[in-house]
Image (cartoon, grey):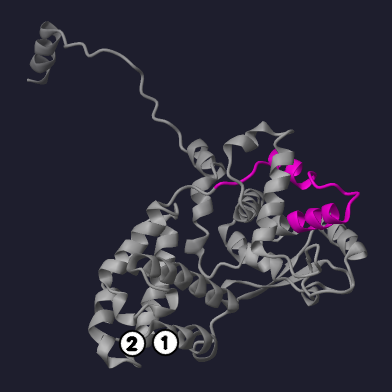
Amino acid sequence: MNALAPYLSAFLLEHLPRERNASPHTCDAYAYSFKLLVCFAAGRLHVKPCQVELEQLDVPLVLAFLDHIESDRGNSARSRNARLAAIHSFFRFLESRLVSCLNQARQIHAIPMKKADEALVGYLTQDELRALLDAPNRSTLSGIRDRAMLHLAFAAGLRVSELVGLRMEGLDQATFATVHVMGKGRRERVLPLWKETVTTIKAWLAVRPCHGDRELFLNAAGHAMTRSGFEYILAKHVATAAREEPSFATKRVTPHVLRHTCAIHTLRATGDIRKVSLWLGHATLQSTEIYLRADLTAKLEALAANVPPMVKAGRFRAPDQLLAMLRRAGRT
């Protein structure tokens, strides 16, 4: 029996960041996946997490863990697949370091990904968006910061990790009219900002504490804003905006909904899916096609361009037998 802890430490602390040069976001996601797995395995085996053995992570336990995160934790099939991808990667790492686990790794790799439903993306209408952007209190430091975060998240279509990880150096220090973003897959992009967005950022920089981390947006302690911190801020202002727009009650507004809203509004304004893909920093157009399915504008234009067949409603009437006979007689 081999202890899990040494191999898991080598995978997370050496293999991912050094050998594969994985991003901090990937390392964090994998570490959280194994935190869930180890805690589940320890509870199922009635041992401490540090006492879990590598051979105990067999197919039945992994399948039970995947069912647990879906049924008990309420995760979607996509989240389940993300946890399974981390487990697959770990056992690929083990194949070249522990020969005795080759058969176990082969069985783990045989666990398939689950097909996920491709639901339509949610987004905000113009009235809902305006109510949300105006929700923060402009007379307080936190309200000025929150307003700048909401404006930037929508205008640039940022992922929450891109927003909270944005540093002061990412802004054009001369005019603040552009922002340099390090996106998913380490794809960099530079985006221009609207004047209204620039105004909110300048208002925040005027009151931003000089001490603290170098990230653009800081929490009350002077540290970089976290993902959960922004989620809390967004939920608070959504509740405020719901007083003006009751339609918020039927929507689940997450940070990614702001990114979807940016994509839908950009698609309607330009009519070009390639520009939306460029703006969002997608690797391929296939990732951007979800917005074509969600937006009715293109479908309505296609419907208007097609002319319906002009068929008049009526009843079939059998021809008169005498007239039919006369027509036949006339041909002879």
Res. 2 mark:
2
Point out residue 223 in the picture as x, y percentages from the top left corner: 77, 70
**Label 2 vs label 1: CA separation?**
9 Å
Please name the predominant secondary structure of the magenta segment in the image. helix
Residue 251, by quadrant, is: top right
Q: Are marks 2 and 1 in contact (CB under 8 Å)?
A: yes
147 vs 242, left or right, is: right
Q: Residue at x 81, y 62 (%)?
A: 220
Q: Residue at x 69, y 44 (%)?
A: 238
Residue 168, by quadrant, is: bottom right
Residue 186, by quadrant, is: bottom right
Q: Amino acid at mark 2?
A: Asn
Q: Which stretch did the figure color magenta?
A: 122-151
* SS at mark 1 in the image: helix
- The residue lying toward the viewer, choosing from 33 and 244, is 33
Point out residue 222 in the picture as x, y percentages from the top left corner: 81, 69
Q: Residues within 10 Å of mark 1 (few under 14, many from 20)?
A: some
140 vs 77, left or right, is: right
In this rendering, the answer to whether 5 lies above or below 299 is: below
Point out residue 232 in the picture as x, y percentages from the top left corner: 68, 53
Point out residue 70 in the picture as x, y percentages from the top left corner: 39, 55
- The residue lying toward the viewer, choosing from 44 and 286, is 44
Q: Point out the tag, 2 or 1, that comes first from the N-terminus.
A: 2
Quadrant in which the N terminus appears: bottom left
Assess whether residue 209 is covered by the magenta stretch.
no
> Taking the image as drawn, is residue 110 in sight?
yes
Q: How many marks?
A: 2
> Taking the image as drawn, is residue 157 in sight?
no
Res. 7 mark:
1
